[in-house]
Image (cartoon, coloured by chain):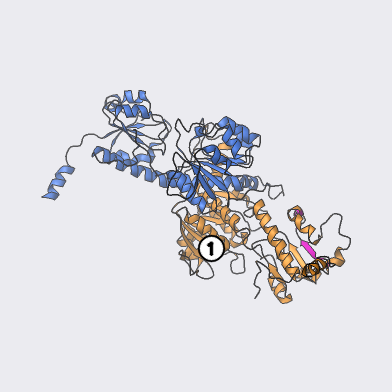
Chain colours: A orange, B blue
Amino acid sequence: MAAAAADNLSHAPQTPRLLILHRFPTFKLSLFSSLATRFTILDPFSDPPHPSFSTLSKLARVILCVGPKPVTSEDLDRYPAVEYIVGTSAGVNHFDLAACRLRGIRVTSAGDVFSDDVADYAVGLLIDVLRRVSAADRFVRASSWGEGKEYALASKVSGKRVGIVGLGSIGSRVAKRLEAFGCRISYKSRKMHPHVSYTYYANILDLASNSDVLILCCALTDETYHVVNRDVITALGKTGILVNIGRGSLVDEKELVGFLVRGELGGAGLDVFEHEPRVPEELFTLDNVVLSPHRAVFTPESFAGLEELATSNLEAFFSDKPLKAEISLE
Amino acid sequence: MAAAAADNLSHAPQTPRLLILHRFPTFKLSLFSSLATRFTILDPFSDPPHPSFSTLSKLARVILCVGPKPVTSEDLDRYPAVEYIVGTSAGVNHFDLAACRLRGIRVTSAGDVFSDDVADYAVGLLIDVLRRVSAADRFVRASSWGEGKEYALASKVSGKRVGIVGLGSIGSRVAKRLEAFGCRISYKSRKMHPHVSYTYYANILDLASNSDVLILCCALTDETYHVVNRDVITALGKTGILVNIGRGSLVDEKELVGFLVRGELGGAGLDVFEHEPRVPEELFTLDNVVLSPHRAVFTPESFAGLEELATSNLEAFFSDKPLKAEISLE
């Protein structure tokens, strides 16, 4: 009896499960191809265009936002039935969260799917800047080694005082990794974490003054916009290193570039920039800087994890089950 | 009374404490400048030449060998009073150890002065190859990001199976660091280490077959020459990564280059080469390779540590006290 009932249910006609794909035109959908077998994807950039896009998009209950494309209040006006936005980044600063709260729209992020990758990359950038790995690679490829040219000495990783800004899912993984290098970890976050042994600083200026390296692992919010300003860079000092795997606007980029060009900061490892994909060209000639095109999260393994999370959250949403990695909008 | 005796002693005429500086002509002595205040340094390349070099060098009891310059049996014939060679590398494969044993000459290495730096660098090279950090930096500096060019996805660090060849002072530090990244560590060494939890393989072929990454941390000896040969590279496989921070001749470089050029090995991070400073030019165009000019040990901090070790060993030698980091020649 129970089996027969279940069988009936599985053959019941399904309400179309519509997802609006919110993306930049250049984004490759292939990364999420498995979703198309379970849901009806409404892609404003599909070629040929979906014949009923304007009708169906007004009925869709979900926006799947891929990449950092903003979801504005105007977008929400255009899609009036939306109840849920699936974010695919660790951060959700590109969503108008106040508008979501007002309309009772739920939001999920990528959770900690990318945390290991981003932490790995942060450590990679730090070693690269301190030990000048990319500069060494350039040196060899330019055949300068064989020509006996000079090569600047790098700086030791082990023993460095590392200040982590934001001890969340990513920051705590960075800390764990760098502890194994014999680095001395301290941090600044909204509040002190009672169960960690790292030194806590209530403000970033004190953290910078007591660190050789500053690693930005926090979300971009109104409070953290330009949290690394002229004073913080000055406190980090002439041999200090800044690593940013958070968001470009955590740093006053114009100030940063000035300090680096004048040799008043030791170096920087930057995966993010204020006006991506624009990178200040003054940095292109500096050997104490490692530049990366916002790729800290990009591994096939993390994309597979993201696809799994998005799929399970969508299934949960359409079955009224709890969502993972949901953002509190209170 | 005791103070007066000590005072007398400190004014006693000293036997000249002669060190032969054994170096390549390009080596900069400034790194060891503090030794010159305590010992008489006989430098065959000094300019102007030391007026009594040929006489004094026959009386010198110590060779201070800086860098990888070989000390041959002929060198020892030329300096017949030598009883002690101060090596400044972690490896001592550039010394004729058989000749040293025959003549009862003691040898010290750099011990573990460089171990943290080399381990840090090995991890840096690994992250760099897996996550394509240097390639990313090249991509940005070439302004390719702004132009929307394609960029290959990298591979995750966390969770990789890492095989370490040589679980000594450097290898065990590499293992400790990569454990914190969630890598699964196994190793091959002359014998099993009873107190570590990593999986042991008695031969490198089995290690390579069961690893995504192979990191060479062993000394170069007759047994380890070309220990990474065609079979081992084949076992590591098409997505496998090789990191070499040991010595170039641990690897059959010609085979390695062939595998990389044909795309039959996933990538390589190489700080050492068979015929330094010559680097096979076929590698210069590959984005899955990171090339470094034998700099894993070069930080100001490790040089300071080396100078301290050399100084204390020389003081100990001239006072008949035990040496640190002495190599057993039995």
Q: Is residue A16 magenta?
A: yes
For mark 1, give the secondary structure. strand
Residue A23: image quadrant is: bottom right
Q: Position of residue B20 (x, y in %)?
A: 32, 31
Packing grade of label 1 (10 A; few <14, some 14-19, many >=20) is many
Position of residue A294 relative to residue B122, above or below, is below
Q: Position of residue B243 (x, y in %)?
A: 54, 41
Q: Residue furthest left?
A: B1
- The amino acid type, in three-letter code, at marker 1 is Val
Seen from the viewer's position, the closer of residues A275 and B309 is: B309
Q: In this image, B42 relative to B181: left or right?
A: left
Q: Is residue B96 magenta?
A: no
Residue B60 visible (yes or no) = yes
Q: In this image, B74 relative to A312: left or right?
A: left
Position of residue A56 relative to residue B151, above or below, is below
Residue in the image at 53% along x and 31% along y: B278
Seen from the viewer's position, the closer of residues A127 and B142 is: A127
For the C terminus of chain B, give its image quadrant: top left
- Residue marked by disc 1: A165
Q: In this image, B53 relative to A199: left or right?
A: left
Position of residue B28 relative to residue A253, above or below, is above
Total number of numbered discs in the rendering: 1
Q: Which residues are magenta?
A: A14-29
Q: Magenta segment, principal secondary structure? A: loop
Seen from the viewer's position, the closer of residues B316 and A1 is: A1
Q: Residue furthest right?
A: A51
Q: Position of residue B101 (x, y in %)?
A: 33, 29
Q: Residue furthest front?
A: A1
